[in-house]
Image (cartoon, rainbow, N blue to C red):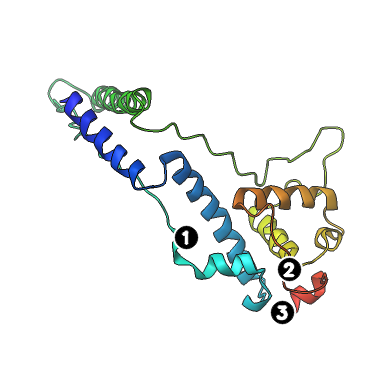
């Protein structure tokens, strides 16, 4: 059975490769990239920045549905049947331990199967996503001196990025509550994850102030 499943998966993988389908690792990276881009677009909208002021490459992404494809690879597990509960000879606590152990074995068998498909080069290894920083996690901070803004909420980070994309200088984005170099580091990291690190020039004209963006 395992050999026949392997042959079917190999044949499907060969067809996908021949037709130029996106690889599994690349698809996972595309999904992460899309999530970051969507958060930037949401920040632009939340700030009330008109669509016409968005950089060209953001407009292209927003209007091209094919750029927003979300890839999935659903894998169905074999059915799990919990052990029977013998009310006359088991306590509820004893049954829970037995059921938990049975589920753990079932789950681990499935995960071992996933590792097997990677080992035989049917499935690709999916790199672990870099942890998204947020409140409680310092960026570039030390005990000697934490950078102001390194612990900013995620929504605020995306709003910093949105303002940067429409030409607001980092010093004005940071204001009195954050450090401009820290804000710049956060913004560059978000743009890198979005695949917009090397962005073309925006058509929005000269740099604008935070006050101008806030009035939109």
* Residue that protrudes farthest toward the front in the picture: 18
The secondary structure type at the circle numbered 2 is: loop
Give the foreground label among 2 and 3.
Answer: 2
Q: Where residue 147 sits in the image (x, y, percent)?
A: 83, 44
Residue under label 2: 166
- Residue linked to disc 3: 216
Total labels drawn = 3
Whichever of labels 3 and 1 marks the residue nearer the N terminus, that label is 1
Q: Nearer the viewer, residue 209 or 142?
A: 209
The secondary structure type at the circle numbered 3 is loop
Instruction: Count neighbours of disc 1 (C-alpha within 10 A) and say few if under 14, some if 14 to 19, many if 20 or more.
Output: some
Provide residue 202's location: percent of width, then percent of height: 72, 68
Which residue, given by chain and number where applicable, does mark 1 sit on? Answer: 68
Left or right: where 196 falls relative to 16: right
Q: The N terminus appears in which quarter of the rendering?
A: top left
| Residue 179 visible somewhere in the drawing | no
N-terminal of the pair, mark 1 or mark 2, is 1
80 and 36: which one is in front? Answer: 36
């Amino acid at each position: 059975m395992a050999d026949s499943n392997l042959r079917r998966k190999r044949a499907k993988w060969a067809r996908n490769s021949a037709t130029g389908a996106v690889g599994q690792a690349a698809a996972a990276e595309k999904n992460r990239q899309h999530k970051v881009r969507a958060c930037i677009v949401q920040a632009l909208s939340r700030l009330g920045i008109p669509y016409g002021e968005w950089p060209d490459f953001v407009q292209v992404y927003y209007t091209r549905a094919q750029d927003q494809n979300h890839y999935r690879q659903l894998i169905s597990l074999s059915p799990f049947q919990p052990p029977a509960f013998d009310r006359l000879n088991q306590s509820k606590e004893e049954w829970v331990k037995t059921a938990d152990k049975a589920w753990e074995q079932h789950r681990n068998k499935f995960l071992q199967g996933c590792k097997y498909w990677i080992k035989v080069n049917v499935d690709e290894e999916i790199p672990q996503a870099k942890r998204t920083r947020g409140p409680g996690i310092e960026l570039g901070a030390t005990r000697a001196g934490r950078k102001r803004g390194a612990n900013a909420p995620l929504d605020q980070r995306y709003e910093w990025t949105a303002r940067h994309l429409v030409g607001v200088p980092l010093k004005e984005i940071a204001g009195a509550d954050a450090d401009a170099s820290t804000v710049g580091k956060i913004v560059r990291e978000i743009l890198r994850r979005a695949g917009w690190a090397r962005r073309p020039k925006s058509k929005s004209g000269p740099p604008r102030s935070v006050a101008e963006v806030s009035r939109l």
